[in-house]
Amino acid sequence: MWPLRKKNAISTNDHRTHVYVGLAGEGENIGPGGLYRLAPDNEWENATVGMPPNSQVRALLVHPQSPQIVYAGTHLGPFRTLARAPARVYLRSVR
């Protein structure tokens, strides 16, 4: 093994982790659905603002190069948010 050297490093604590959860049901189990985000105070906040009522969120994707962009796949089509804001922009399905 090569000798390990300790290097001077500057550390910043700018990194934030965001946790999202999408809710969806099937058949007789359809509930309100929605998209939620874990807030810094460890409380879940509703991030469904701008989406139709009872949106069934079946898939989530955080853009790999732009983590402020979150996509939510619903039974009504895809939705997108910018800057982790609760407002959503509807993306029409291309057919």
Image (spheres, helix red, strand yellow):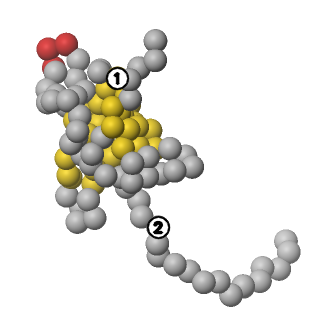
Q: What is the x, y in percent for residue 60?
A: 39, 36
Seen in the image, is 75 located left or right of residue 16? left
Please tell me which residue is depicted at 43% across the width and 52% down the height of the picture: 68
Q: What percent of the width, then of the height, locates residue 20?
A: 33, 46
Q: Mark 1 is on which residue type?
A: Gly
7 up-or-down from 25: above or below: below
Q: Which residue is mark 2?
A: 15
Residue at screen point 23% across, 66% down: 41
User: Vertically, is 62 above or below 11?
Assistant: above
Q: Which residue is mark 1?
A: 77
Residue that lies at the very extreme toward the right in this rendered image: 2
Q: Nearer the viewer, residue 42 or 68?
A: 68
Q: Does residue 47 lie above or below 83 as drawn?
A: above
To which quarter of the image does residue 81 belong? top left
Report the number of discs.
2
Mark 2 residue type: His
Q: CA distance from mark 1 to mark 2?
A: 31 Å
Residue at image position (83%, 80%) is 3
Residue 56 seen by the camera: yes
* 62 vs 26, nearest the viewer: 62
Instruction: Tell me where residue 22 appears, x and y as whole percent.
Output: 29, 36
Q: Secondary structure at mark 2?
A: loop
**Residue 18's quadrant in the figure?**
bottom left
- Crowding around mark 2 (Cα neighbors within 10 Å: few <14, some 14 to 19, many 20+) is few
* Residue for point 50% across, 44% down: 63
Q: Secondary structure at mark 1?
A: strand
**Marking on residue 17:** none
Nearest to the observer: residue 44 or residue 89: 89
